[in-house]
Image (cartoon, rainbow, N blue to C red):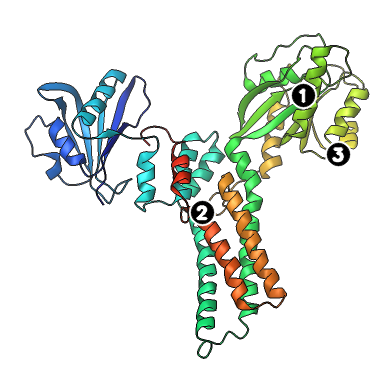
Amino acid sequence: MKTDTIAAISTGMTNAGISIVRISGDEAFNIIDKIYSSPKGDKKLSEVPSHTVHYGYILDGDRTIDEVMVLVLRGPNTYTREDVIEIDCHGGVVVTKKILETVVKYGARVAEPGEFTKRAFVNGRIDLSQAEAVIDVINAKNEYALSSSLSQLKGNVLGKIKEIRDSIIHNVAFIEAALDDPEHIEIGNFSEELLMNVNSNLTVLDKLLESADNGRLLREGIKTVILGKPNAGKSSLMNVLLGEDRAIVTDIAGTTRDTLEETVSIHGITLNIVDTAGIRDTADVIEKIGVKKARENAMNADLIIYVVDGSRDFDENDYEIMELIKERKCVVLLNKSDLNMKITIEQLEELTHKTVIKISAKEGTGIEEFETCIKELFYEGKLNFNDEIYITNVRHKAAIAEAKESLLQVKNSILDGMSEDFFSIDLMSAYNTLGYIIGEMVDDDLVNTIFKEFCMGK
């Protein structure tokens, strides 16, 4: 199938050592032959072997634009499965743009966002889940998100979904064949075998769905809310974690009136931290709004960090916060250990039934223990991406949940003793729904929407 030839700058638009202009399509070699010149007068790049690198110049007519290295790649052994040329030029913004303009002048058009990866999908080199993993790799906020995205890019999600779909279509084919030719194909105890197969697939889908919450945390980060009464040291903790004085810290209670949001990485785990107003009863209208927002943020948090001022006795504000965190994932920090302490770790553990760590935000002590606790709390100290699959994509999660419902309907039909032709309908529904994940049974609008999220040149 002949397609038009696209080109784009595939590196960041800033002054750098090297920039790359990528060309893909049927006219890639014709275009490079018109604008490339070798200092030795060698043969045209359309005549050289694939996967070779060549030194020379990019010309626009008689004018030299830049000294370059050109990578020659022949389809189908390329990213897009088309002929691909990559021009490595000097990394100036002006010269890189000029090379792209020259490539377009001689026959290419500027690629749309994500169009190279879209062609890789359309040409069958990768499935849709792998294509989505490309943008996840680019946008990864931490090492765990990167590892998960690379796992998906290798086809781990594709492999698991393909296994389930293969078993489903095998069962559908057997049912249809038995119904069409009952004299030669004995359906016998097939319902019992099918039930075992459906239960096995349901177990796999349940495991994938269970991974989705951790997958979301890997991709987006952990929504973390710092709670405490006024002057407990919440803003000081925020500054310690960020490594800079981002939040205003004073001895005046109620300094923080509104939420302050920042992102920090702890042991490769991304925390989206919200520092909130101190929780207390107050007549101040503005502070009252801040306290209300603190409570609302706590209800939607993945993790709460409850900061307790260990130099002061408990009061009604502490007991209100303890009620808020009762059913939430929470770490309690007993702060101000550099002062005379009036509260012990044992007291806090008995009241909150949470992990309690003694720290001094002012002195920076206990922070390392707290950071280790965060990692263990969410991942039990380990993550193994060699054999674990995490669902990080909302679209994938929805499709898996829908497929699960279809298989549950098959299970119910078997247990109710219904005829085999009823099984095929729901089995095919599960098969098609799982196909959405890997790019089968999807419409062009969805595909276009996914690739519009990509950056130019990818």
Look at mark 1 in the image and give the residue it sits on: 293
Residue positioned 85% across, 11% down in the render: 284
The three-letter amino acid code for the residue at tag 2 is: Tyr
Side of 11 relative to 54 (left or right) = right
Q: Which mark is residue 353?
A: 3
Residue found 76% across the figure and 15% down from its top: 257
Sequence-first disc among 3 and 1? 1
The percent position of residue 277, horizontal first and vertical second, equals: 78, 19
Which residue sits at x=55%, y=66%?
A: 428
Q: Determine the secondary structure under disc 3.
A: loop
Closer to the eye: label 3 or 2 = 2
Foreground pick, 311 / 49: 49
Q: Residue at x 50, y 82 (%)?
A: 180
Q: Nearer the viewer, mark 3 or mark 1?
A: 1
The percent position of residue 202, horizontal first and vertical second, equals: 64, 63
Q: Tell which residue pokes out farthest to the bottom in this image.
A: 183
Q: Quadrant of residue 352?
A: top right
The answer to whether one can see residue 335 in this image is no
Mark drawn on residue 436: 2
Question: Which of the two marks, 1 or 2, is nearer to us in this view?
Answer: 2
Q: CA distance from mark 3 to mark 2?
A: 44 Å
Callout 1 amino acid: Lys
Dot 3 and dot 1 residues touching (CB under 8 Å):
no
What's the distance in space between the residues labelled 1 and 2, CA to CA? 39 Å
